[in-house]
Image (cartoon, helix red, strand yellow):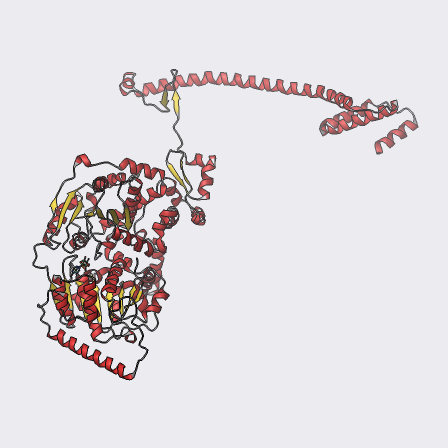
Amino acid sequence: MPAPAHIRLPANGNASGPPPKQKNNSRLTKSLKRKRGEEEIAKLSGAVAAFDLKAASLFSELPLTRQTAMALDKSHFKTLTDIQRKAIPLALKGRDVLGAAKTGSGKTLAFLIPVLENLWRAQWNTLDGVGALIISPTRELATQIFDVLRKIGREHTFSAGLVIGGKKLKEEQDALHRMNIVVCTPGRMLQHMDQTVGLNFENLQMLVLDEADRILDMGFRKTLDALIANLPKERQTLLFSATQTKSVSDLARLSLKDPEYVAVHETADSATPAKLEQFYMVVPLHEKLDTLFAFLRNHLTAKIMVFMSSCKQVRYVYETFRQLHIGIPLLHLHGKQKQTARTEITAKFLAAKNSCLFATDVVARGLDFPAVDWVIQLDAPEDPETYIHRVGRTARFEKTGRALLFLCPSEEAGITARLETKKVPIVRVNAKQSKKKEIKTQLQNLCFKDPELKYLGQKAFVSYIRSISIQKDRESFKLQEYPLEEFAASLGLPGQPRIRGLKTADLEKIKERKNLPRALRKLAEAAEESDSSDEDDEEGGAKKKEEQKKVRTKHDKMVERTNQNVLAGHYRNLVADNGASDDEADFLQVKRTGYDTSSEESGDEESEEEEEGEQKEVKKIVAGPDGKEILIDSKRREKLLTSKKKLAALKSKGQKFRFDEEGNPHALYELQDESAFHAAGAPEVQRKQFVEEEGKKVKVADVEDRELAREKKRIKKEKRKQREREEIEGEVEHGIQLHDKLELPDWSDNDQEESGVALEEEKRQERPSKKRKKEKRKAIEAEDEPETLEDLEALAAGLLE
Ligand SMILES: Nc1ncnc2c1ncn2[C@@H]1O[C@H](COP(=O)(O)OP(=O)(O)OP(=O)(O)O)[C@@H](O)[C@H]1O
C-alpha cells in the first residue's frame, strides 16, 4: 500500500484514531495538563542531558518519550544496532552527527527517533510549521523513510508529509502548511520553496540528509545549495550514509557545528555486511545477456535484483526476457516510469517471494527489500561506493545474501583493485559452460518481428556506450576495448547503431540535470541558456544562440520524433513517461538504417513533410528495393514506396554485360590476358591492325546500312501508296454503306434522289478539306457548259448562293 502523502500521527498512545475529545475541558484541567506536560519535558530533558553515551544497548534504556518507546515496542524493535547505540544519544543531545555504517544496519531509526524526540521536547505543534526536514535522493527511499516514520511515530501528534512529486503540486502545497515533519526529495522540495506561497522554514529545528554523500555530490549540488539557502543556519543537522562523505568542502556547505563523526564499521575488515558473499565473473560484453539468462534459468525460486546502467537497458532486457519466458516473475524499475508504476512495482517486489527485478541505480541506495537472495550487477558500477550500495540490497540486518558482479575483461584489473582498496572482499568465479545458452538468435527474431523492440535495443546499445564514455574511472572503462559490433549482435540488432556526440557528454552535467524534477529541468535549461548569453556581449550572445540553434539538426529532430512515435503504445509509455525529456538524446543518438538515413539527408521540403507526419504511428516494415528493411512510419513514405518510378530511383543502376556465343556473360570492357597480348606483337602494330580491321568492318557495315535504309524507304513508299489506294476505295464503299443503312420511307423517286444528293453532300463535308476542294474543282469542270442566257443566270445564282 503506498503511504499517504500527509498524515497526522495519532496522539497519546491511541493508535486506532485521534484521542477522544474531553467534554469537560475546564481551565483547571488544562493548566494541570500543561503543568504535567512541562514537568514531563523537564524530566526527560534532564535525563537526556545526563545520559551516558555508551550506556544503552536496549531501546528501553534510552531517555525516550512514552510515545516513541511504545511504538518501538509494538514494532518489535528491542535491541539497538551499533549505529543506533552511538548516534541516537548524540542526536538526542542536539549534536550534529555524521553517521556512517554498513548497509542494512539500521541508520533510518538512528535519525528518525531523534527527530520525534527533539521535536516533542521542543513542544512542537501544527502552528509551529516545519520542524524537521528529511531529504532522500530518491522517491522510493523517501517513501520508505516515511513508512518507518509512520510506524514509530504513530503514538505522537505530529503532522508528517511526504513531498516527492509524482502528484499534483497543489495537493502537496495545501498539506505543506500543516506539516511538522517533511520527508522529501531535493528537487521537489526546492520546487515548493519557489512556488508555494507562505511556505517558510524559519523555525526549522532539524535537517537530515539520508544517503548524504549522494545528496552532496555534484548531481544535486545546485539544488541542495538552493534548498539550504532557504533554511535557518541555527539548526541541528544529521547526515547518514553507508559511504559517508568526509569532504570538508561538502560539510562546509551545510554549516555543521562541531559535528560528531560516528563511523561504527570503520575498523571492520570489510565495508560490506559480514554475511554477504561476493563474487565476480569475467564475461565478455557480448556474452553478458547469455550468462544472465542462464543464471536466471538456474535460480527460478530466488529473489533477485539485477542492476544495469541505464533505463533503456533495463527496459530492453525486461521486454525481451519477458518474451523468452524464463520461468521467474520479472519486474523492472527505473527513474523514467510514472510514479504510480514505480510505487506499484516496489510494492510487488517487497511482497514477492521469488522474482527478478531489473533496475537502475534508482533502487541502489537505502531500499529495504526483505529477503533478497542475489544482487547481480550486469553492468559494472561507476565507483566502489555504488557497488557497496547495490550489494547492500541483500544481506540486510544480519541476514545472509549473495552478490555477483559481471566484469568485462578490460574492466577486471581496474575495478577489482578499487574494490580492494575500499575493503570489499570479492572472489572470482567462472560460469559453467554447460549451463550457458546463447539467446542471440531469439533476440534477433524478436527484433525482426517487432521494430519497436529493435529500436529499443538500439537505444539500449547507445545508452550503454554512453554510460561507458562518461565514466570518471578512465582506467577501468576504456571504450576502445569493448567489442561493439559483437555487443550489438548479442542484443539481436542487425548492425551496430551509429553513435554521435560522445565527446560532448559531461557526467556531472548529466547527473545534475537528471536529478532535477522534470519541470525544473526545463527551467534550468532555459536559465543556463540565458546565463550564458548574459556573459557574452550582444554579438557574442547572438552568435551563441545561433550555434545552439544549429546544434539541433534535422537528424536530432527526427530521432526525437521517433522517440515519440516509433515506439507505439506500450513502448511509448515506457519511453515518453510523463512527458519526460530524453536526456540522452541531447548528445547521443541512434542513426537509423535504411530509408531513414536517406530521408534525413534530403531537402527541407521533405523534412517539413516529415514533421507533418509526426503524429503518425509505425505502420509496417517492408522489404526495400535492395532487400533492406524499410520502416513505413508516415503516409509520405508509404506513398513513395508505392510509386514504381520513385522506387526505381532508389534502386541500384545494375550492371551491363555482354554475352558470348555460348551465352556466357562478360563485362563490357574485359581486359585480355596480358601474356597473350604481348605474344600478339608490338602494341602499336596491334593498334594499327585493329584500326584497319575495324575500318573494313565499318565499310561493309556502311554498305549494308545504306541498302537497309533504301529498302526501308521503298517499303515506306509502297505502304503510303497502298494506303492512298485503300482510301479512295474506302470512300466509295463508305458512301454505299451509308446509303444502305438508311431506312427510306416509300417516297417518290424525286425525293429519293434528293436525299441521295443530300447524303452525298454530307459525305463530302466529312472528307478532309484539301480533298473536298479538289473534288469541287472537278465537279465544276464536269458541269455542262451554259448554252443560253437563262442557263448563265442560273449558274450565276448558283454560284452566289
Ligand atoms: N534495532 C533494530 N532491531 C531490529 N531490526 C532493526 C533495527 N534497526 C533496524 N532494523 C531493521 O533493519 C533493516 C535495515 O534498516 P535500515 O533500512 O534502516 O538500514 P540502513 O542502514 O539505512 O541501510 P542502507 O544503508 O541500505 O540505507 C530494516 O528492515 C529495519 O527494520
- Where is residue 124 shown, x and y percent of the image? 25, 75
The answer to which of 516 and 668 lies nearer the viewer is: 516
Judge whether 378 appears above or below 198 on screen: above
Residue 562 visible, this angle: no
> Residue 631: x and y, percent?
39, 40
Question: In the picture shown, does residue 329 fall above or below 254?
Answer: above
Question: Which quarter of the figure is the C terminus placed in?
Answer: top right
Q: Is residue 740 left or right of residue 186?
A: right
Q: In percent of the image, x 24 and y 82: which residue is there? A: 32
- Residue extending furthest toward the front: 24
From the viewer's side, name the closer residue of 449 and 590: 449
Q: Is residue 257 above or below residue 211?
A: below
Q: Which of the image's four quarters has the N terminus? A: bottom left
Residue 429 point in image, percent of width and height: 13, 42
- Left or right, 190 with reference to 703: left
- Toward the bottom, the furthest residue is 28
Quadrant location of residue 362?
bottom left
507, 713: nearer the viewer: 507
In the image, is 77 to the left or to the right of 15? left
In x, y percent, where is residue 359? Answer: 25, 50
- Is residue 89 visible to us here? yes
- Quarter of the rendered image showing ligand 1: bottom left
What is the tally of numbered marks visible in this picture? 0
Name the image quarter holding residue 693: top left
| Residue closer to the observer: 615 or 258 | 258
